[in-house]
C-alpha cells in the first residue's frame, strides 16, 4: 500500500478531531521514537524545512537518524491495521 493511500486511511482511523499533534519544532521527538511518515514528505521536509505528520499525529521537522530509535508503538499499530 502506498503511503499516500495510507495517509487517507489514517484520517479514517484517527480523525483530526481525535489527534493532538505536537507542533513543537524541538529536537524532533521528545518521546525518542522513530515515526512512520510518507517517504516523499520526509524528502520534501529535508529540502524545505517544513514539518511532517506521522501516522500517530505527531508533527515535527525530522533531523536525526530514525534507525537509532525504536518505532513508535502507535504508528506501528496504525500501520499494521492499515495493512490488514
Image (spheres, rainbow, N blue to C red):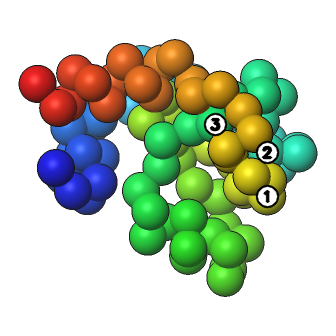
Q: Residue furthest left?
A: 84
Q: How many marks?
A: 3
Q: Which residue appears farthest toward the bottom when viewing the image?
A: 47
Quadrant in which residue 67 is drawn: top right
Q: Are marks 1 and 2 in contact (CB under 8 Å)?
A: yes
- Quick one: label 2, few (<14), some, or many (20+) residues within 10 Å? some
Numbered mark located on residue 28 in the image: 2
State the separation of the CA atoms marked 1 and 3.
11 Å
Cα distance between the residues tagged 1 and 2: 6 Å
Residue that label 1 marks: 63
Q: Residues within 10 Å of mark 3 (few under 14, many from 20)?
A: many
| Residue 47 image point, x, y percent | 67, 82
Task: Point out residue 8 in the picture as x, y percentages from the top left corner.
Answer: 22, 46
- Which residue is drawn at the image coordinates 42% and 25% (left, top)? 76
Q: Nearer the viewer, residue 48 or 63?
A: 63
Q: Is residue 44 above or below residue 41?
A: below
Amino acid at each position: 500500500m502506498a503511503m499516500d493511500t495510507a495517509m487517507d486511511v489514517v484520517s479514517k482511523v484517527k480523525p483530526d478531531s481525535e489527534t493532538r499533534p505536537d507542533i513543537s519544532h524541538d529536537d524532533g521527538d521528545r518521546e525518542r521514537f522513530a515515526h512512520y511518515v510518507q517517504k516523499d514528505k520526509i524528502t520534501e521536509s529535508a529540502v524545505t524545512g517544513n514539518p511532517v505528520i506521522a501516522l500517530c499525529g505527531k508533527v515535527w521537522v525530522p533531523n536525526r537518524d530514525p534507525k537509532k530509535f525504536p518505532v513508535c508503538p502507535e504508528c506501528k499499530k496504525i500501520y499494521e491495521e492499515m495493512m490488514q
